[in-house]
């Protein structure tokens, strides 16, 4: 289960800031959304491309009473509003740059190097989706949480005296949404991990992994049961 679930390490905002892309940047318009506000519904009537300039955007699917997060977009990430997924602002004053998909498609044909970036973005999203589906089908909640923490450590962990410190920037509700389980389940599992010495809580959005080996053993055990 991806930790940040960011689509790619390539920052498109930074790329578009280059003088060579000034014409491409000019086709975008800014839109601002507030926390938990729905940005687009499945098959949104406006066929637009959105580029996250500020804040975070959640991309998710919904079936009956369950929601499955495909990605958490961060500044520099790009996505289409005209898909079968929902998109939702996770922060107040989330700022998006939006452009008509047709116009965007016409423009990027003039910039082959930018097209390569787009292929990387789409490939990362597909990989993310397959990983999430695999986790939801084959893994129990505690295993998904363990994998989430392991990937977070690889992505943004910082070695400190007590172990690996993670500035997740996510609360319990955010994590439960990513893992496809309830807030109560995640809270219970985190408290269990704290109690058993796997984790150390620094504050609401920061923790330290004290026993990485034990987290990895949880994943290994799950693989053996498949």
Image (tube, grey):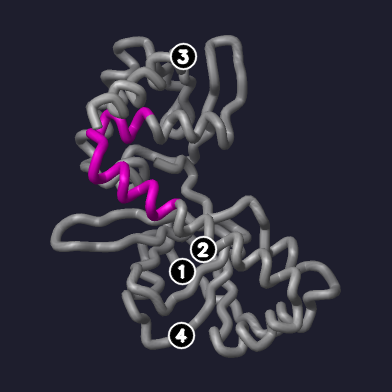
On the image, numbered disc 2 is attached to which residue?
Answer: 94
Work out which quarter of the rendered image holds the C terminus and state it: top left
Q: Is residue 55 left or right of residue 194?
A: right
Percent from the top left, x then y, of residue 187? 26, 31
Q: Residue furthest left?
A: 64
Percent from the top left, x then y, of residue 134? 31, 45
Marking on residue 47: 4
Q: Is residue 137 left or right of residue 101?
A: left
Residue at the image point whose x is 27% and y is 46% from the top: 180
Magenta-colored stretch includes residue 135: yes
Marked residue nearer the N-terminal end (2 or 3): 2
Badge 1 vs badge 4, beta-carbon distance below 8 Å: no
Marking on residue 33: 1
Badge 3 vs badge 4, beta-carbon distance below 8 Å: no
Q: CA distance from mark 1 to mark 2?
A: 5 Å
Q: CA distance from mark 2 to mark 3?
A: 34 Å
On the image, numbered disc 3 is attached to which residue?
Answer: 210
Is residue 174 positioned above or below 202 on the image? Answer: below
Percent from the top left, x then y, of residue 95? 55, 67
């Amino acid at each position: 289960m991806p930790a940040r679930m960011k689509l790619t390490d390539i920052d498109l905002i930074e790329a578009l800031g280059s003088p060579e892309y000034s014409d491409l940047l000019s086709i975008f318009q800014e839109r601002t959304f507030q926390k938990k506000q729905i940005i687009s519904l499945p098959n949104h009537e406006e066929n637009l491309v959105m580029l996250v300039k500020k804040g975070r955007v959640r991309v998710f699917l919904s079936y009956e009473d369950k929601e499955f997060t495909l990605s958490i977009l961060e500044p520099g990430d790009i996505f289409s509003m005209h898909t079968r997924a929902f998109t939702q602002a996770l922060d107040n004053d989330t700022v998006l740059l939006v452009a008509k998909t047709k116009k965007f498609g016409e423009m990027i044909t003039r910039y082959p190097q930018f097209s390569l970036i787009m292929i990387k973005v789409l490939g990362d999203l597909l990989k993310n989706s397959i990983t999430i589906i695999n986790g939801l089908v084959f893994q129990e909640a505690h295993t998904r949480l363990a994998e989430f923490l392991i990937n977070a450590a690889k992505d943004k962990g910082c070695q400190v005296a007590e172990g690996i410190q993670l500035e997740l920037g996510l609360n319990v509700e955010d994590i439960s949404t990513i893992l496809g389980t309830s807030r109560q389940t995640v809270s219970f599992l985190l408290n269990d991990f704290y109690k058993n010495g796997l984790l150390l809580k620094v504050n609401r959005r920061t923790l330290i992994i004290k026993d990485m080996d034990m987290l990895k053993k949880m994943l290994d055990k799950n693989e053996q049961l498949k």
